[in-house]
Image (cartoon, rainbow, N blue to C red):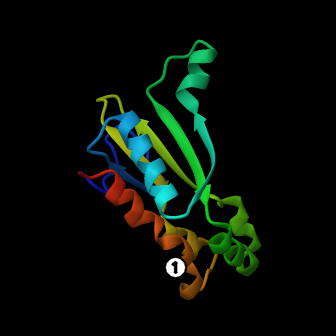
Amino acid sequence: MVNQAPADAYAPEGVVSRSSAFTFIETTKRIQKALARNGFRLYALIDHSADATGVGVAMPEATVLIFGKPEAGAPLMVASPLLALDLPLKALIWQDTARQVWVSYLSPAWLAQRYHIPADLARNIAGMEPLIAAAIQP
């Protein structure tokens, strides 16, 4: 199921969804550890499901990790200032109605195309895809 959109989710252009072999909590921890090991800064963790619970709405697990490397992102934003709308990078870790855990993010290749980033600079964000793929597979 890797790289396949879940049956109950709308997949807009540029969004990649990968199924995880692990629980929601384990997936979240594994991605956070992989980010730290690879020099990414975790700017924020937004727990949407906890916020929903706080206002009386039940929803499946959903957490967004916001992360990046200033030394990688800054040159990209110099080349295309509007890219700052989509940086730092984000990964949504969530469960579908069948309790399958997914990780969804904007494809670095799609971001590069959307903002007309030269290939040599696009490599600055391309590494997040294999990092996530490795973190969610046994």
Q: Is residue 102 left or right of residue 109?
A: left
On the image, numbered disc 1 is attached to which residue?
Answer: 123
Q: Is 105 placed above or below 61 here?
A: below
Q: Position of residue 57 (x, y in %)?
A: 55, 16
Tell me which corner region of the image, top left, top right, bottom left or bottom right, holds residue 16.
Answer: bottom left
Whether residue 95 is visible here, answered yes or no, is no
Whether residue 75 is visible here, answered yes or no, is yes
Residue in the picture at 54% in, 71% down: 125
Is 86 or 33 nearer to us in this picture?
Answer: 33
Residue in the picture at 56% in, 24% down: 50
| Three-letter code, disc 1 | Arg
Q: Residue furthest top?
A: 56
Q: Position of residue 113 (x, y in %)?
A: 55, 76
Q: Residue furthest front?
A: 37
Classify mark 1: helix, strand or loop.
helix
Q: Is 97 placed above or below 42 here?
A: above
- Total labels: the figure holds 1
Is 23 or 36 nearer to us in this picture?
Answer: 36
Q: Is 103 placed above or below 82 here?
A: above
Is 41 or 92 nearer to us in this picture?
Answer: 41
Residue in the picture at 32% in, 59% down: 134
Is 95 or 71 nearer to us in this picture?
Answer: 71
Circle 1 packing at 10 Å, graded few (<14), some (14-19), many (20+), is some
Residue in the picture at 76% in, 72% down: 81
Tell me which corner region of the image, top left, top right, bottom left or bottom right, holds residue 95.
Answer: top left
Q: Position of residue 77 (x, y in %)?
A: 72, 73
Q: Position of residue 28 (x, y in %)?
A: 44, 41
